[in-house]
């Protein structure tokens, strides 16, 4: 068990990529804090993991766009488990609108969850990870190549990559590594609810669609000692889709 007794916080952990990441850390012996805004789904996720094996699990209902709630999650996690070793900033929202139809409220909603949520958890990690640790930001392939009608999401995810670099620079002196993962098309509701795909504006071949476990595997690598010299970078996990001519 590579992460035996390590304390891992995962946001957006009630389903999809977040739940897959939480599951992999839990199987590897970590004490896992499942964080999401949907308390019912959180309880279901906890039950799913608890059925796999005995281990330490905790659920925390949290709106990641609320700094006070994020701070409280960090406090409660340390109170229960004594420390924090890994934080995975996975919580995210996506709005599908033409750029000119976006409102200020739309932009603020996306930026507050997709970018500020990661900032809040990183801030409190820097204040509380006394023995160092690892932060993994789940960005998106949209950070470097995007499609119509997702301007706010693409911008937030691109900013998250830049924030990852800045966090890594400042994290060095604290022995905190910060890296990002850029998932491509992953088999989650967010993918199939995409109106661009439904309308045929974005073509998805079956061999271009990954599984949440594909992202989870990379997250475990980045959090492991095998990635001890990996800092301030990102890994594209898209099955090579953007590399095809």
Image (spheres, rainbow, N blue to C red):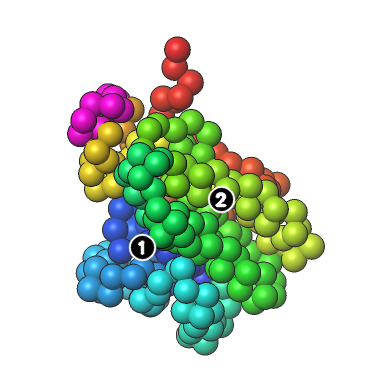
Q: Residue furthest top?
A: 245
Q: Is residue 171 above or below residue 245?
A: below
Which x, y percent locates residue 187? Answer: 28, 41
Magenta: main secondary structure equals: loop
**Label 2 environment density (alpha carbons within 10 Å; few <14, some 14–19, many ≥20):** many
Which x, y percent locates residue 242? Answer: 46, 24
Q: Which residue is rendered at x = 58% and y = 42% of the image?
A: 234
Lower sequence index among marks 1 and 2: 1
Which x, y percent locates residue 154? Answer: 47, 42
Q: Which residue is mark 2?
A: 160
Which mark lies nearer to you, 1 or 2? 2
Front residue of 21/164: it is 164
Q: Is residue 31 above or below residue 22?
A: below
Q: Residue furthest right?
A: 173
Task: Report the side of 231 relative to 182 (left or right).
Answer: right
In the rendered image, residue 243 lying in the magenta stretch gets the answer no
Front residue of 94/219: it is 94
Q: Which residues are magenta?
A: 197-207
Which x, y percent locates residue 77? Answer: 49, 80
Task: Name the disc covering residue 66, or none.
Answer: none
Q: Residue furthest front?
A: 100
Q: Which residue is mark 1?
A: 13
Q: Is residue 98 above or below residue 171?
A: above
What secondary structure is marked by label 2? helix
In the rendered image, residue 199 lying in the magenta stretch gets the answer yes
Q: Which residue is rendered at x = 46% and y = 37% of the image?
A: 141
Which image quarter holds the C terminus?
top left
What secondary structure is marked by label 1? loop
Say which quarter of the image contains residue 233: top right
Task: Report the side of 175 relative to 239 (left or right).
Answer: right
C-alpha gap between disc 1 and disc 2: 19 Å
Q: Are marks 1 and 2 in contact (CB under 8 Å)?
A: no
């Amino acid at each position: 068990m590579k992460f035996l007794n390590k304390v891992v916080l995962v946001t957006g952990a009630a389903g999809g990529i977040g739940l897959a990441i939480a599951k992999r850390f839990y199987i590897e012996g970590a004490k896992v804090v499942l964080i999401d805004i949907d308390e019912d789904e959180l309880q279901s996720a906890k039950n799913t993991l608890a059925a796999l094996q005995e281990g330490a699990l905790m659920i925390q209902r949290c709106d990641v766009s609320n700094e006070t709630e994020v701070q409280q999650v960090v406090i409660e996690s340390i109170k229960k488990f004594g420390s924090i070793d890994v934080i995975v900033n996975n919580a995210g929202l996506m709005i599908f609108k033409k750029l000119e139809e976006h409102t200020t409220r739309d932009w603020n909603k996306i930026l507050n969850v997709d970018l500020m949520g990661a900032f809040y958890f990183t801030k409190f990690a820097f204040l509380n990870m006394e023995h160092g640790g690892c932060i993994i930001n789940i960005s998106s392939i949209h950070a470097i190549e995007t499609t119509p009608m997702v301007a706010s999401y693409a911008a937030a995810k691109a900013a998250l990559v830049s924030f990852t670099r800045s966090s890594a620079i400042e994290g060095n002196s604290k022995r905190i590594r910060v890296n990002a993962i850029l998932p491509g098309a992953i088999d989650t509701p967010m993918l199939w609810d995409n109106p661009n795909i439904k309308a045929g504006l974005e073509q998805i071949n079956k061999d271009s669609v990954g599984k949440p476990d594909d992202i989870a595997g990379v997250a475990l690598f980045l959090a492991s000692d095998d990635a001890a010299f990996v800092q301030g970078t990102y890994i594209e996990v898209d099955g090579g889709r953007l590399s095809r001519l």
